[in-house]
Image (tube, helix red, strand yellow):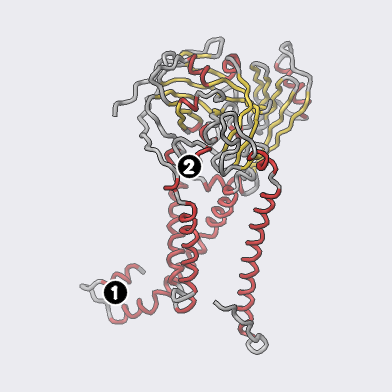
Amino acid sequence: MADVAEAAAAPGKAPGPGLAATVRRRWRAWLRAIHRDIGYLAVGFTVIYALSGIAMNHIDDWDPNFHAIELTRTIAPIGDELSDADAAQRIAAAAGVTGVPDDVYRAGDEVRLSYGNGTKLTAIGDTLTVQSRRDRLFFRVADWLHATRGKQAWKFIADVYAGLLLYLAVSGIFMIKGRLGLRWRGAALVGLGLAAPLGYLVVSGGPGAQKTERVATRPGEVDPPAKPRAGADGITPLPPDEEPAKR
Amino acid sequence: MREPRRPDLDRYPELQKAWDRRQFIKSAAAGTAFMALGGALVRLAGDDLTREARAEKRSDGKRRLPPGQRALDKLRPMGGEEGDGEVRRWKLRVHGLVKAPFEIDYAGLLKLPQVQKEVDVHCVTGWSLLGGLWKGVSITTLAEKAQMKGEARFAIFEAAHGYTTNAPLKEAMADAAMVTYRLDGKPLALAHGAPVRGLVPDLYFWKSAKWLTGIRFVAADEPGFWETRGYHNHADPWKEERYG
């Protein structure tokens, strides 16, 4: 379509009288056809982004990623004289968890059991805490896709989708002419859609309403050299950090 | 705009579809508005915790619940790239402007002097958890152990996957500021930063880095992950310093 439009607009290369007329006559139909096909393409993305967006908007009301379980039980305290295996057996039995833990870790007044499925059992004195969770159907993966932090290829794909959405939005304005288009209904609804964010900016004062502070840029970091092993107190002395470059 | 008159559908049956669509849109809009309003009313009506907290004051004279916050009865998982959560592999590096930088493991952390304090925390998204009993090691203890130099002005909290956040020493070394591994007698859940997270109670909660791996003392401020993405560099809940 762009080629045709350029050809129609280029003064040096005047197209045949039929082409310019065709462009003038057909551009809206082409716009609609492309809008339709991009709309089909965008369905999957839109469902994922919209539903995960709603889910994450309300993250302070629910956990959009996991069904998390946390239970506590009162148990007989695990004495230091018990071996790791015996302690693990007693804790697992109290929690009603079967299977062999991947790790049994004891420190201070804690005994912690970790299982391959992510379940954690922690005994602190006479309290046993069971922490477990499982993925929420759909939302776990949708939320993961929504957040592009740390992703490479998906960030690019998400940019392409954003570009497609922009096309859908802008082409939508021009798809229909007359009273249902920009002459009345279209213009009114576009105005309403713009009024919502603009109105909120005016009412809330926008980001400028918050006091801003000048922020410094972050100096580069240098990898630390190899470190000595930890002592019995769990503390490993480290060499001093490299001085950051003067700016 | 005048309410459109119902067309004579018996006489013009071809208008039936358009009329049905209009009615559907009206019903959908009304239903959405009703549900949104209903949800807001339910939240307002049932929120005794928030009402009570709004009536309280702190010992420093500030309102207990900062403006724009509502009180919840438990922490909410706010996302982020989780660390692996395993105590056996966990280590904390205390470094930067210190004379004796060190790295400590979980067992070592539990051998240091412990603190346990009732602390309120305030999330920038608008919820607060009041009176949680947090246990851990004071950041002052860690700074003393590392022999922090006098020119240090800020603490940079380092966490899994390169996350950082910054806090002036005034808040980072406040009385209740600590690295914490226990809330209300229970270990932290992975979603809340297990095994150890920072706790800087007088700033919005994103300053209390989850999945903590290091504390670096610096002279010049270094805005971290959220601070360089539009959130406030200081983040005082009582001044509603949410966005920068």
Give the residue type that dot 2 points to. Arg
Residue B81 higher or lower than A160, as above or below:
above
Query: Where in the figure is residue B115, as x and y percent of width and height?
Result: 61, 19
In this view, the residue farthest toward the front is B61
Q: Earlier in the sequence, mark 1 or mark 2?
A: 1
Q: Nearer the viewer, residue B104 or A192?
A: A192
Identify the mark at residue A202; answer none if there is no mark.
none
Q: Is residue A161 visible?
A: no
Give the residue type that dot 1 points to. Ala
For label 2, the SS is: loop
Dot 1: chain letter: A
Q: Which residue is mark 2?
A: A149
Quadrant of the rendering where the C terminus of chain A is positioned: top left
Q: Residues within 10 Å of mark 1 (few under 14, many from 20)?
A: many
Dot 2: chain letter: A
Residue B181 quadrant: top right
Alpha carbon distance from label 1 to label 2: 43 Å
For label 1, the SS is: helix
Tag nearer the camera, 1 or 2: 2
Q: Is residue A123 visible?
A: yes
Q: Residue at x 57, y 50 (%)?
A: A52
Q: Residue at x 36, y 29 (%)?
A: A220
Query: Where in the figure is residue A240, as x and y percent of width and height?
Result: 39, 16
In this view, the residue farthest toward the left is A12
Whether the residues at callouts 1 and 2 have beta carbons within 8 Å, the answer is no
Q: Which residue is mark 1?
A: A8
**Are the numbered discs 1 and 2 placed on the same chain, yes or no?**
yes
